[in-house]
Amino acid sequence: MTTTSNEGAAAAFGMAQQAAASYQAPANSVSTDVAQAAVDQYRAEAQYEPFRELLPDGSELLVPWPTGEQMMRIAESGSEIAVAKVILGDQYDHFMATVGQRPFPEMMKFIERMMKYFGMGESSA
């Protein structure tokens, strides 16, 4: 019997669910308190300054580092405009009202600076 890729994926997903449901942490695993302390330390070390930029109207745009969820949405879309929409969030309309009214190359330079600041779109060459 031939299976389709959807059936194969469903079977693999079912097997993964069964494995996760039956998983038991080893007796010598790290305690919850120790694990939480490690997570807290990582978070303290992973603090990053937001991207700051003056807009043509004199206002300051302050953009926090993107979350993992935002990065996944950006990766899925693959466009610079999606980067601006996802990362700027509530500030997107103000951005477009100021920077979006400038010549297109200026707007793209702004987006490119923001992407570079957040380590996006860098070449691996």
Image (tube, rainbow, N blue to C red):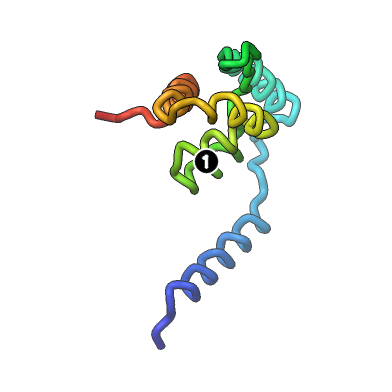
Query: Can residue 125 be seen in the rendering of this structure?
Result: yes
> Could you tell me residue 89's position as x and y percent?
65, 34
In-image side of 26 versus 110 (left or right): right
In-front residue for pair 45/48 = 48
List the residue tagged with mark 1. 82
In the rendered image, the quadrant that contains the C terminus is top left
- Residue at 63 percent across and 22 percent down: it is 64
> Could you tell me residue 113's position as x and y percent?
45, 21
Q: Is residue 1 above or below residue 100?
A: below
- Residue at 62 percent across and 29 percent down: it is 97
Quadrant housing residue 78: top left
Q: Is residue 52 above or below residue 25?
A: above
In-image side of 100 versus 91 (left or right): left
In-front residue for pair 74/22 = 74
- Residue at 49 percent across and 25 percent down: it is 102
> Could you tell me residue 79's position as x and y percent?
45, 42
Residue type pointed to by label 1:
Ala
Furthest residue toward bottom: 1
- Residue at 41 percent across and 88 percent down: it is 1
In-front residue for pair 16/63 = 63
Q: Residues within 10 Å of mark 1 (few under 14, many from 20)?
A: some
Q: Is residue 55 above or below residue 100?
A: above
Query: Can residue 48 be seen in the rendering of this structure?
Result: no
> Could you tell me residue 49's position as x and y percent?
59, 13
Furthest residue toward left: 125
Q: Is residue 68 above or below residue 39?
A: below
In-front residue for pair 78/96 = 96
Quadrant housing residue 30: top right
In-image side of 32 versus 71 (left or right): right
SS assignment at label 1: helix
